Amino acid sequence: MFEMSVSASELIIRAVVIYFALFVLMRFIGKKHVGELAPFDLIVLLILSETVSNALSGEDKSLTGGLISAATLIALVQVMSFVSWRSKKAERILEGAPKILVRHGRRRSRVMAQEQVTISELLEALRRNGCTNINDVRAAVLENDGKISIIMREDGK
């Protein structure tokens, strides 16, 4: 139960490699998809976790090995959080930057296509914020968490 068949250093290296590989893949799919998990996306994430579980531990099935892998992953999350907190440049690389979808009542179709945000998704976000006319929008921003923030124009402008 506690006897490991793989060295602790190998488990740590495996966890680091898997963490960064999954991080890159998750950044690749885009912030809209990470913020809004559909049932299909949740299933993919569950299968993904099962797929990498053997890669994390190799042949090791011990409790100790699992705890070392879990501790390594948690430590990596903390390190990445600290690095992004300390450096704005690192934060932009690790977390991305918000994207402006609407500016002064005009849709930015190129940005919407790049971020794979449909017009219906944008209109839904506008309705949630009580907006019925896109011309009343000063800005609609796709945040890093996948949500769309709406900033309304002030009256008379």
Image: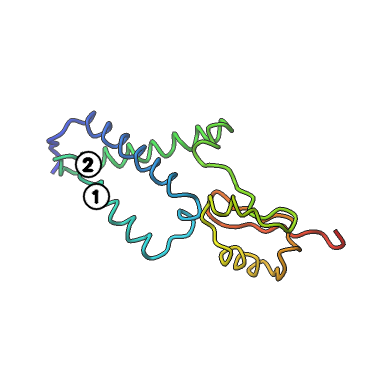
**7 or 143: which is nearer to us?**
143
- Per the image, the residue denoted by label 2 is 55
Task: Please name the residue shown 17% across and 39% down the image.
Answer: 58
Q: Is residue 102 above or below residue 90?
A: below
Q: Is residue 13 left or right of residue 142?
A: left
10 Å neighbourhood of mark 1: few (<14), some, or many (≥20)?
Answer: few
The secondary structure type at the circle numbered 2 is helix
**Residue kind at label 1, given as amino acid type:** Thr
**Residue positioned 29% across, 51% down in the render:** 49
Cβ atoms under marks 2 and 1 closer than 8 Å: yes
| Left or right of 92, for residue 74 | left
In the rendering, at what x and y percent does residue 88 appear?
A: 59, 33
Distance from Cα at disc 2 to Cα at disc 1: 8 Å
Residue located at (14% from left, 36% from top): 4
Q: Amino acid at mark 2?
A: Ala
Where 32 sits versus 123, above or below?
A: above
Name the residue: 21% across, 39% down. Answer: 65
Quarter residue 107 falls in: bottom right
The circle drawn on residue 51 is 1
Question: How far across and how far down the image is residue 7, in percent?
Answer: 18, 30
